[in-house]
Image (cartoon, rainbow, N blue to C red):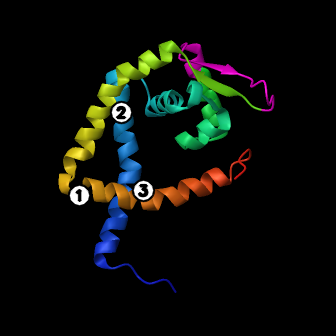
Amino acid sequence: MPTPLSSAEERLWRSLQRVLVALPRALHEDLLRSTGLSLSQYLVLMNLSEADGNRMRMTDLALATGLSASRITRLVEALRTQGLVVKRTPSTDARGSVAVLTEAGRQRLLGACPAHLASARRRVMDQLDPALVQRLAGELQAVADPLVFRCRRAGPDRTL
């Protein structure tokens, strides 16, 4: 039988669950209203901008954004029709596709970045004690890193 949560642990756990549901919705609404980009579109453009050569395999992009393979395919196709990304078949492995950020996509991301940062600051950072931010970042990273590793390890084209 697992050890029951203390009242402080229970409060943290319930608050974390509410944040995990409500925060993405709020960030999405803020971004969509101010830039016309959805949070998922923003995350795709951001991940591509940070990737080597501004390109990622579709499977890796799905993992990085937390989206399903079918959802990332539809999303990249929508971004492609807007000229923000292109899709290519890699010369080394024709089994998958690669999404590549275009210059128009980079400009759209740069234009949306201030609105996204303002939303993140207002909704999260301004609510936290500045003295705790660094420690909280480390604590949450300690929780997130093993989860991300496990997800990536389970990916179909991952070799570790």
- Mark 2 or mark 3: name the one nearer the start of the chain: 2
**Disc 2/disc 3 C-alpha distance (Å):** 26 Å
Q: Position of residue 146 (x, y in %)?
A: 53, 60
Position of 4 with respect to 8 (left or right) is right
Q: Which residue is rendered at x = 28% and y = 35% of the image? A: 119
Mark 3 is on which residue type? Gln
Q: Crowdedness of circle 1 by 10 Å Cα count: few (<14), some, many (20+)? A: few
The residue carrying mark 1 is 132
For residue 8, above or below residue 60: below
Q: Position of residue 60 (x, y in %)?
A: 63, 39
Q: Amino acid at mark 1?
A: Leu
Question: Which element carries disc 3, helix, strand or loop?
Answer: helix
Pointer 2: what residue? Answer: 29
**Residue 77 x/y as whole percent:** 62, 22
| Residue 34 placement (x, y as % from top left) | 31, 23
Q: Does 57 sit left or right of 38 as displayed?
A: right
SS category of the residue bearing label 1: helix
Foreground mark, 2 or 1, reads: 1
Dot 2 crowding, Cα within 10 Å, few <14, some 14–19, many 20+: some
Residue 141, disc: 3
Foreground residue, 152 or 122?
152
Region of the chain picked out in magenta, as a range: 78-95
* Residue 74 falls in image quadrant: top right
The CA distance from mark 3 to mark 1 is 14 Å
